[in-house]
Image (cartoon, rainbow, N blue to C red):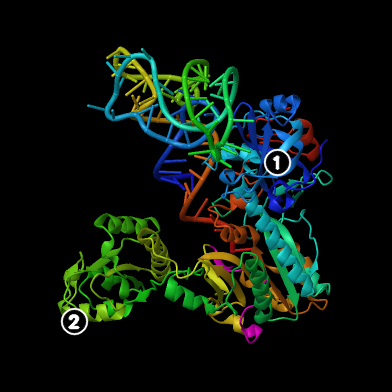
Amino acid sequence: MIKRSIPCGLIRASHIGQTVSLNGWVHRRRDHGAVIFIDLRDRSGIVQVTIDASRSSEAVHNLAETVRSEFVLGLKGTVIARSSDTVNPKMDTGEIEIECHELEILNTSKTPVFSVADDEEVDESLKLKYRYLDLRKKSHLDKFILRHKIVQAARNYLDKEGFLDVETPILNKSTPEGARDYLVPSRVNPGHFFALPQSPQLFKQILMSAGFERYYQIAKCFRDEDLRADRQPEFTQIDIEMSFVDEDDVMAITEGVLRESFSTIGVELPNPIPRMTWAEAMSRFGSDKPDLRYDLELVDISDLCKNVEFKVFNDVANSGGMIKGLNIKNGFTLSRKNLDDLVEFSRKHGAKGMAWITIKEDSPVNIDQYEYSSPIVKFFKPEELRTLMERFGAVPGDVLVFIADKPSVAYDVTGRLRLEIAKVLGLKPKAPYMFTWVTDFPMFEKGQEGITALHHPFTMPHIQSVDDLDGDLLAINSRAYDIILNGVELGGGSIRIHRSDLQMKILNLLSIDAESANEKFGFLLQALEFGTPPHGGLALGLDRLVMMMTGSESIRDVIAFPKTQSATCPLTNAPGAVSLAQLKELGLRIKIAVVED
RNA sequence: GGGGGCGUAGCUCAGCUGGUUAGAGCGCCUGCCUGUCACGUAGGAGGUCGAGGGUUCGAGCCCCUUCGUCCCCGCCA
């Protein structure tokens, strides 16, 4: 076999005159009869190889005629300069070409089902079925190179900061909280199941108890929930935990990881990354993961609506609800259909409707002489309208939109509207990457069956003493923090509870009694009784991070072998049926699926 | 569990109001071609219109069922 002496994409004019050996794939072939051009591609790039009848042996020329796309070649040749009129400035290697004098076909290829050389849209399941072809495309390769660099940057940084890379088990015990578990039957213990980790949460806390002080892991996590463009059943976290720390320490380390990661693409992060509380995020942006690339902040007019004639606003304002609005600057470019679509959008997300007021573009600039187009202005007295306009800072050409509903819906829908409007109007982002921390989340929220933890039950509440937990639980915040990038939750974490009495109390409040707490988390509760230090940490979603840094539309583009939306793998046809013998060995019987034997 | 989009040649797609033999670009095959780089050129092959059922004189097109895929809601402590 001819082995390469240099990667294809690295050959330059400085190599002219040298004899080189190359390995690679046939990217394209152009057969001119007596002269054949082959674009040879390997991971490093592409170089043009020429087989010239007048200079190559007949054997080499004949062999080159049989070569097709994606054949794998080994060849030897001389690096020669291209004549000035044949230099290709579009190619890194465009100043030179390889005059081939020895050629070996290392493998042939069937005609590719889709082109590797062209970057056309291909059906998703076809791409995944022939993933090895899809991944040969440069656009894909570049993403995995960046992913590698990010992981390297994170590892180097964390190593420098004294973190130990420790692996935690994949086979775990199922706990019913949180997402649905992937289960693995135990042969040795029939009828019992392992669960794949949703995250290494409890183990990393145990490692703190073990005195490791600083832990990290590039950790695979598994959640059996429905998929989205940014959600896969298995995904990867950069998982971090530290002892003897508070929020500032964890956030500083996280920012360090992100800073090192982004420096690989030449992006400098703000130092420090700005922070806002959960309450501020909700009131300004209607979301606990605000997208700061756009203005369009929420304006509350609940107080102005208590006495207005407009019954929809009046009723909501006087029954504990809220009226939230947005001022769409120069929104007059929105068509009536756009507005109708926004109303429909609001309904889809749970609001009863959406009201709007357009201040006509050609209105007089005097606020009292504004001319409106709106189904609702007739319900407002002139002075009420004036106050409303002042509250929004509205000027001619602006469009105001309103959601009136119970607070949770009003925040949520208005928050979603902001992003929808930004999309519809094609608003220009203030910057490509806008980070923020969101801190001080509520510790608890009202679930369908009592109180549940907003973050997870091991999060430290913001309290002075355990007795505070006897008061209004919904008023208590947690020492949790999320890192948000462009409205996407990149990661989250918290300072943890490190005392068993507090931990037990929290679990009790969540309607988990001592017995079941001990059954599920007994090992953690026990560890807390044996000198577990104060600790906290965070996990970053690596796939989402890479997705955003590469400008990818889907997390699938940055995972080598992703699943389809129905959680299948077209490449391997996983998941598949198993034999009756396997089932028997595991003590399982299948009721619904047909089992292939 | 629910809403929406898509499924026609190897790939990407067009196909009007239901009407003759289902088209295009790229790819593929054969011939020609010594300077192309998305080579050119002449010719050619290639179709279960996702599948099943129904309506109709007649279905790629309408209806029902179903499968696959994508986006979204719910879900994702």
Picture residue at 15% right of the left edge, 77% below the top: A369
User: Could you tell me residue A207's position as x and y percent?
Assistant: 80, 69
Say whether residue A582 is left or right of residue A176: right
Q: Read off the chain for label 2.
A: A
Residue A182 visible in the picture = yes
Decide which of A571, A434 is in the foreground and name it.
A434
Q: Could you say which quadrant of the image residue A570 lies in? A: top right
Q: Read off the chain for label 1.
A: A
Tag 2's secondary structure?
helix
Q: Which quadrant is the N terminus of chain A positioned in?
A: top right
Main SS, magenta residues: loop
Residue A575 visible in the picture = no
Picture residue at 64% right of the left edge, 74% below the top: A255
Query: Which of labels 2 and 1 is toward the front?
Result: 1
Specify the segment rendered in magenta: A449-467
Relative height, residue A422 to residue A392 (above, below):
above
Picture residue at 59% right of the left edge, 29% below the top: A32
Q: Which quadrant is the C terminus of chain A positioned in?
A: top right
User: Could you tell me residue A237's position as x and y percent?
Assistant: 68, 61
Give the number of the disc on residue A383.
2
Q: Residues within 10 Å of mark 2 (few under 14, many from 20)?
A: few
Q: Could you say which quadrant of the image residue A238 lies in? A: bottom right
Q: Give amino acid for label 2.
A: Glu
Give the number of the disc on residue A98.
1
Decide which of A457, B8 is in the foreground and name it.
B8
Q: Earlier in the sequence, mark 2 or mark 1?
A: 1
User: Could you tell me residue A252's position as x and y percent?
Assistant: 66, 78
Whole-number angstrom distance, CA of label 2 to CA of label 1: 81 Å
